[in-house]
Image (cartoon, rainbow, N blue to C red):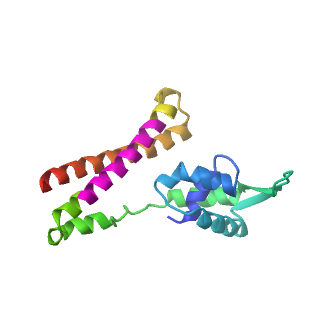
């Protein structure tokens, strides 16, 4: 997947300025597709040149003008075509797993400390996901189709983080 498709996926719901898009990106697809704000701004320009987005300048008093980006019909068609293409399961690339694989040559304390740090980070992300679930997805019967798809991605995030915490707990138990 390209960053372009992640941006189109966010903009399909509503237009946004670059700044608002970057903030919204952090709280939605940014959970599973990382991009810096600088990368997002660069990509917005490319997408506009390709005709997948259009921008409208909104004058503001006392502040620089704001540019709102809208997904175009060509952008929607590109996103639909991309969604229709099969994708391969993502390959695992994880520094921690490489460290664990060869961890026997280091001090067990170093590995245990690293495991504790990862466990804490995954617990924090899991807490964020659980809060989102409680706030936005309590009644599945009342969700729109778009909300159901958003919820499915959140469920995967919850499962992913839960699995990481359980694995860290088990690894810590084995190494103690």
Vertical comparison of 142 with 12: above or below: above
Tag count: 0
Vertical comparison of 132 with 164: above or below: above
Vertical comparison of 124 with 104: above or below: above
Q: Is residue 114 magenta?
A: yes
Residue occupying the point 65% across, 64% down: 41
Q: Percent from the top left, x then y, of residue 66?
A: 78, 55
**Residue 69 located left or right of residue 132:** right
* Residue 171 visible: yes
Q: Percent from the top left, x then y, of residue 125?
A: 41, 47
Q: Is residue 103 magenta?
A: no
**Residue 154 located left or right of residue 146:** left
**Residue 117 located left or right of residue 46:** left
Q: Percent from the top left, x then y, of residue 72?
A: 71, 57
Could you say which is closer to the camera, residue 12 or residue 57?
57
Residue occupying the point 17% across, 67% down: 107
* Residue 81 visible: no
Q: Quadrant of residue 77?
A: bottom right
Residue occupying the point 22% across, 48% down: 169
Q: Percent from the top left, x then y, of residue 110?
A: 23, 63
Residue occupying the point 22% across, 62% down: 111
In the image, the segment drawn in magenta is 113-132
Main SS type for the magenta part? helix
Could you say which is closer to the camera, residue 139 or residue 18?
18
């Amino acid at each position: 997947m390209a960053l372009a498709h992640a941006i189109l996926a966010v903009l399909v719901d509503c237009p946004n300025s670059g700044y608002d898009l970057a903030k919204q990106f952090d709280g939605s697809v940014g959970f599973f597709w990382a991009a810096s704000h600088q990368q997002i701004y660069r990509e917005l320009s490319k997408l506009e040149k390709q005709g997948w987005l259009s921008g409208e300048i909104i004058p503001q008093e006392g502040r620089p003008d704001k540019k709102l980006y809208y997904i175009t019909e060509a952008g929607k068609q590109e996103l639909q075509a991309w969604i229709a293409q099969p994708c391969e399961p993502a390959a695992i690339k994880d520094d921690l797993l490489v460290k664990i694989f060869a961890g026997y040559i280091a001090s067990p304390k170093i590995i245990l400390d690293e495991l504790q740090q990862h466990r804490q980070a995954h617990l924090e992300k899991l807490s964020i996901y659980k809060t989102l679930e409680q706030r936005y997805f309590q009644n599945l019967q009342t969700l729109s189709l778009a909300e159901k798809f958003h919820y499915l991605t959140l469920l995967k995030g919850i499962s992913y983080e839960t699995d990481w915490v359980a694995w860290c707990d088990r690894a810590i138990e084995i190494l103690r």
